[in-house]
Amino acid sequence: LDRIGRKKDVEIVYFRCQKAKPDLARLFEQLDLYERPSAGLDAALAPIRAAIEEASERRKTLDIDALVARVAAEREASLNVPRVLYTNAYEASQEEKIFALVPEDLEPRTRRFCLGAANNLGMRIVEKGGKALYYLELGASLTVESLPGVPEGSRWLGTFDREEAVDKEELDFYASGHPLVEGLLLELEDGQRGRAGLCEIADEEETGAGLFCVFRDGPEWTPVVIDSAGKHRPDLAPRLVDGLAEATPLDPADLEIDEHWADAIRELGECAERTFDDNTPDLELALFYRFVQP
């Protein structure tokens, strides 16, 4: 039973059958499963199911006293396990710095990313109202064989809003750690989709266009910006990174692309590679951008 966020005691209601063999109600009472947490007792509780099934199939008396004694010994032993205390696990002075890394609009961003990625991958999406309630399913129209870590045919009814997820515990909360969200992020990172694109970014100060590349060398990620004149523009990298969350996909037809388009992009890509002295890291992303006035 999940007690997180509860403001009153959890009430457990169960029924007793006087002629039950085995008498599970009595067993669970004596094991204190209705009164005390059972965390850390997995090893001790595991054989109980087998004992119950055997007693039920053979219609024999369940040795409740032996099972209770075993669990009691395990419970006592669990209290004596030394626990490591990390005295520096939390530093109050770092609180503001840590929370500053979390965008205030993280939930809307997660919603926008997941729904966009799910739509591009052919998932079934059904809006269910609420604050941000959606039914999502890996159906037959999926355009990839699978999502990393997500079982075939998975489906969820959940929300992108934290408060709604807390109020309705039966809903999934689509956030970091959820299998769908993690699967979509891994597909974005390891799959071939999303590695090339065109977009417009609203900016009150900047104008012009160019190529935005992201190179990866092990754990190191390096953004490189080359404007349409072939000039290295490191000053634009922060603007592009911040602006991508609100960027608008650009239709190639709006650019009046001709037969020289591919050659021009290759030239800008070569300019990006020349920003490195020795070995060029792996190219992870190539994005043609265009700044427009809001």
Image (cartoon, rainbow, N blue to C red):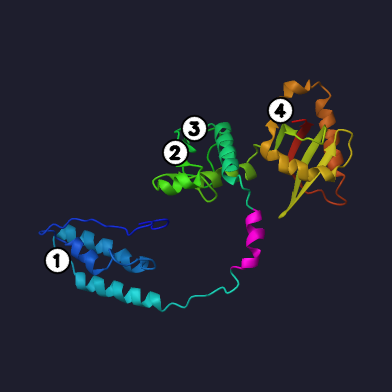
Mark 1: which amino acid?
Thr
Identified at 26% across, 57% down, the residue is: 12
Q: Find residue 157 and name its label.
A: none
* Residue 292 appears anywhere in the view: yes
Q: Position of residue 32 (x, y in %)?
A: 27, 68
Q: Marks 3 and 1, how far apart in space?
A: 52 Å
Circle 1/circle 2 CB separation < 8 Å: no
Q: Nearer the viewer, residue 135 or 63?
A: 135
Residue pictured at 67% horizontal, 40% vertical: 245
- Sequence order check: which comes first, mark 1 or mark 4? 1
**Of the image marks 3 and 1, the number of the one nearer the N terminus:** 1
* Callout in the foreground (3, 1): 3
**Dominant SS type (magenta):** helix
Q: Which residue is mark 3?
A: 125
Closer to the chain start, of discs 4 and 3, is: 3
* Whole-number angstrom distance, CA of label 4 to CA of label 3: 24 Å
Mark 3: which amino acid? Ile
Disc 3: CA contacts within 10 A as few (<14), some (14-19) or many (>=20): some
Give the residue pinned by disc 4. Answer: 250
Q: Residues within 10 Å of mark 1 (few under 14, many from 20)?
A: few
Name the disc covering residue 61, or none: 1
Q: CA distance from mark 4 to mark 2?
A: 33 Å
- Marks 4/3 in contact by CB < 8 Å: the verdict is no
Residue 293, position in %: x, y?
Answer: 77, 30
